[in-house]
Image (cartoon, rainbow, N blue to C red):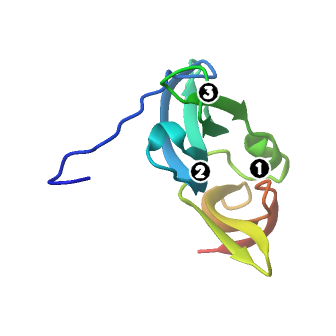
Amino acid sequence: MKGGESSDTVTFESTLDSINEGSPSFESVNFKNNLKESSITLFYEFQNFMRKTKVAKGMMSPNPDGDSPKWKTYPANVNEVFDASGLLTTFGSRSKFMYDKKNYYLVETSKYNSKENTLESYIALCDKAMVPLALLPF
């Protein structure tokens, strides 16, 4: 970027029957000379037509047959795993970090306390597949 103007731009079609996409958290970036030659992997949130927020993984990779890079998306099982753990499937921020050569995530989430009729906020410590390992109240 020079003088506030981008030197490269890539736009992808919406996928997974989504009406909204956002809140990316980058998994990896392998930047080459420009975006079209680079590889990017990220988690992101999307809303489907039922207005349910879900998490997916997107991967951009170079396309040897054309100008535009390839964009492939995969539904993640994060919603199902969080739901089975008693957590609400509305997510706040996600942060990836490495400890002892292993990847982990901190994920902002909530849990409904039916006894007190309250919503409790947590930071979930998750493994590389975003499976909760521990909950930290905040």
Q: State the quadrant of the C terminus.
A: bottom right
Q: What residue type is disc 2 on?
A: Phe
Q: Residue 121 location, x and y as percent?
A: 60, 64
Q: Is mark 3 on a helix, strand or loop?
A: loop
Which residue is at 80% across, 63% downward? 127
**Quick check: marks 1 and 2 in contact, CB under 8 Å?**
yes
Q: Earlier in the sequence, mark 1 or mark 3?
A: 3
Residue topped by disc 1: 82
Report the residue that reaches farthest toward the bottom.
Answer: 100
Which residue is at 50% across, 21% downward? 13
Q: How crowded is mark 3: few (under 14 residues within 10 Å), some or many (20 or more)?
A: few
Q: Residue 128 location, x and y as percent?
A: 78, 59
Q: What residue type is disc 3 on?
A: Pro
Q: Is mark 2 on a helix, strand or loop?
A: loop
Nearer to me, 127 or 113: 127
Residue topped by disc 2: 91
Q: What is the distance, in whole Å, between disc 1 and disc 3 at their CAs? A: 38 Å
